Image (cartoon, rainbow, N blue to C red):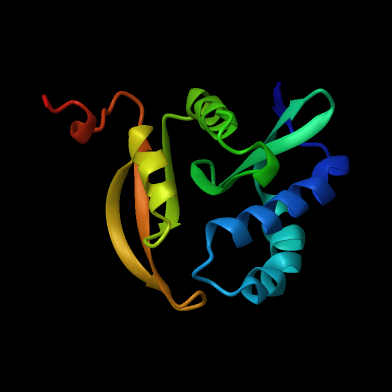
Amino acid sequence: MIRKAKPTDIDKIMQIWLEANIKAHAFIASEYWQKHFDEVKNNYLPQAETFVFEDKHQLKGFISILLDNFVGALFVDPLYQRQNIGSKLLDYARKQKSSLNLKVYALNQPAINFYQKNDFKILAEKYDESAQTKELIMGWMKGAKNPFLNKAS
């Protein structure tokens, strides 16, 4: 079940955020994520519209949207990855919004593949000074299909 996050979910959301970031971004030192933990918890999360995926009273993933259409976070607990939870959260957000944008690190090929499979297009490339790595800005708009998925083989 997907539902709006409650204040009592914050600690679990942040645990998922930290563990999933460290797992997905082996090219960035884990200290980077620990250093930004409080900033995300106290500044970004309160401003975001956050939805959680809960199954059998277990919070397994979440998506946070900032500024009406920016996906600031989409993470699944590493114990429950590869169970379609990320896709369900993304589908839920896409039903609420007519467009979504996000940033993804260029070295995180599994995430890029996931978003492209879900009709996101690469819009721009930039360098994240804070993380010291290149990132891609990706976007999705209702009704726009990914041309790479529609090519005849």
Residue 133 figure quarter:
bottom left
27 vs 153, left or right, is right
> Which residue shows up at 23% across the image and 30% down it?
149
Residue 40: tell me if it is visible: yes
Residue 46: tell me if it is visible: no
From the viewer's perspective, is residue 135 above or below residue 46?
A: below
The quadrant of the image that shows the N terminus is: top right
109 vs 25, left or right, is left
From the viewer's perspective, is residue 133 above or below residue 124?
A: below
91 vs 106, left or right, is right
> Which residue shows up at 36% across the image and 27% down it?
142
Residue 127 figure quarter:
bottom left
Residue 40 position in % (x across, y down): 69, 61
153 vs 111, left or right, is left
Residue 100 position in % (x across, y down): 43, 39
> Which residue shows up at 48% across the image and 28% down it?
94
Residue 53 figure quarter:
top right
Q: Closer to the camera, 141 or 18?
A: 18
Residue 98 position in % (x across, y down): 42, 29
> Which residue shows up at 53% across the image and 66% down it?
26
The quadrant of the image that shows the C terminus is: top left
Residue 71 position in % (x across, y down): 52, 46
Q: Closer to the camera, 104 or 93?
A: 104
> Which residue is the extreme one toward the right?
8
Q: How many dots with numbers?
A: 0
